[in-house]
Image: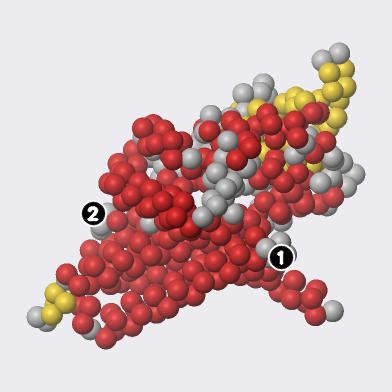
């Protein structure tokens, strides 16, 4: 846990320097090879990035939500693929264990996640269950025989981030076939090496090359009953929603960082690029795009910090988290579009990073709940509070 501002500033300075000196120069290589170099991943582990949110007692840094936000804003100033390799582990991949796991489950897995020995993936989405996550069909049927007490898991998960690198999956599966709703869903820790698990081909995506997703297929996969998170059936959907609420603030902070990078690049280009005998930054219509981007970026940054502080104070931030995710991801898309416009024809070329960012940031409006899902969450919470 960061106990003073000086220590926090030192951490932020280290992350900022790592981004500037190691990650930014490697962006093109990662985009071209679709792979993050092992040396960079090792340096991430040494910096403690895989244990940002995990308690000190398990080997992590135990950052508060506000501290995590500040780190992720810095990490956002480079390709989102770099954050993805550890972001799932410190976020949705480990938080279910941290929030609802038994003491034994925490002791077994959290130290290995914090060190980077294990990468965790969050297996919720399915071919027919995305935004409507409560309708998932993957089944986990309890079975006791001479091999012990197990759940037999069958089903397919889709778009699972870091699945090719995962050591464990935080799996959401239906343990009560008669209950088709959220209350029939349970959460499990599943060893990725378990017999009965196979992976689909790595998805070829629009952007975020270097961050891998693929299908995960469970075919009569036996999961020990002791790996049921919290040893309680029917609590998995609630666990998932708690995890996603935190993850939405995390992603909103990344959006702020990426938007900052794109706007800084666009401003620098506008100062250097000359037309009609002067830098295009002197033209009012270009200034309008810069000003609108700065104003929206400032608003998103304030929102994310406020939501993080409220969560740290113990408040229910379901609405605020969705507001952050909705506004920051949409803001990031608008900043990307304006940045390409400021670059002009150069912004459409792969020679300039803005073309890559333009594709990368489109995903922010889809994962951790689409913009439309955030609108539904916000509005339902408003109606509920007004009754």
Question: Where in the figure is residue 364, as x and y percent of width and height?
Answer: 51, 59
Residue 315 - label: 1
Residue 351 - label: 2
Residue at the (29%, 81%) spot, across then down: 287
Residue at the (21%, 82%) spot, across then down: 282
Between disc 1 and disc 2, the foreground one is: 1
Question: Where in the figure is residue 307, as x and y percent of width and height?
Answer: 61, 66
In the depicted view, which residue is nearer to us: 250 or 161? Answer: 250
Q: In terms of image quadrants, where is residue 124?
A: top right
Residue at the (38%, 65%) spot, across then down: 260
What is the total number of numbered labels drawn onto the structure image?
2
* Residue at far right of view: 178
CB within 8 Å, label 1 to label 2: no
* Residue at far left of view: 277
- Residue 365 visible in image: no
Mark pair 1, 2: CA separation? 46 Å
In the image: residue 131, left or right of residue 364: right
Give the colouring mode of the picture. secondary structure
Residue at the (46%, 51%) spot, across then down: 7
> Under tag 2, what secondary structure?
loop
In the depicted view, which residue is nearer to us: 313 or 149? Answer: 313
In the image: residue 288, left or right of residue 283: right
Residue 62 - label: none
Crowdedness near tag 2: few (<14), some (14–19) or many (≥20) residues, C-alpha within 10 Å: few
Mark 1 or mark 2: whose residue is earlier in sequence: 1
- Residue 272, relative to residue 286: is it above or below? above
Query: What quarter of the picture does the C terminus occupy?
Result: bottom right
- Residue 106 visible in image: yes
Crowdedness near tag 1: few (<14), some (14–19) or many (≥20) residues, C-alpha within 10 Å: few
Question: Where in the figure is residue 279, as x and y percent of width and height?
Answer: 16, 77
């Amino acid at each position: 846990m960061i106990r003073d501002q000086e220590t926090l500033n030192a951490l932020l300075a280290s992350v900022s320097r790592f981004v500037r000196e190691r990650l930014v120069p490697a962006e093109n290589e990662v985009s071209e090879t679709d792979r993050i170099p092992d040396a960079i991943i090792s340096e991430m582990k040494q910096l403690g990035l895989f244990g940002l949110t995990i308690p000190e007692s398990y080997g992590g840094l135990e950052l508060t939500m506000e501290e995590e936000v500040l780190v992720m804003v810095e990490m956002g100033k480079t390709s989102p693929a770099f954050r993805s390799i550890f972001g799932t582990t410190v976020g949705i991949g480990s938080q279910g264990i941290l929030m609802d796991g038994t003491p034994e489950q925490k002791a077994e897995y959290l130290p290995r996640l914090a060190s980077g020995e294990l990468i965790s993936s969050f297996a919720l989405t399915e071919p027919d269950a995305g935004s409507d996550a409560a309708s998932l069909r993957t089944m986990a049927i309890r079975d006791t025989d001479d091999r012990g007490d197990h759940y037999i898991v069958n089903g397919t998960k889709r778009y699972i981030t870091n699945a090719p690198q995962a050591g464990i999956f935080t799996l959401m599966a239906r343990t009560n076939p008669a209950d088709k709703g959220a209350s029939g869903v349970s959460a499990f820790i599943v060893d990725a090496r378990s017999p009965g698990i196979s992976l689909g081909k790595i998805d070829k995506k629009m952007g975020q090359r270097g961050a891998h997703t693929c299908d995960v297929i469970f075919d009569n996969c036996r999961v020990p009953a002791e790996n049921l998170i919290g040893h309680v059936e029917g609590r998995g959907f609630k666990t998932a929603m708690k995890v996603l609420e935190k993850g939405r603030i995390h992603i909103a902070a990344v959006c702020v960082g990426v938007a900052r990078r794109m706007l800084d690049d666009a401003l620098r280009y506008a100062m250097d690029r000359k037309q009609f005998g002067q830098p295009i930054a002197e033209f009012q219509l270009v200034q309008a795009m810069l000003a609108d981007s700065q104003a929206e970026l400032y608003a998103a940054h304030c929102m994310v910090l406020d939501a993080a502080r409220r969560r740290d104070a113990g408040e229910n931030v379901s609405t605020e988290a969705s507001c952050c995710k909705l506004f920051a991801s949409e803001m990031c898309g608008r900043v990307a579009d304006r940045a390409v416009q400021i670059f002009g024809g150069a912004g459409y070329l792969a020679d300039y990073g803005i073309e890559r960012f333009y594709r990368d940031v489109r995903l922010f409006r889809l994962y951790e709940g689409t913009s439309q899902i955030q609108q539904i969450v916000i509005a339902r919470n408003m109606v509920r509070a007004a009754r």
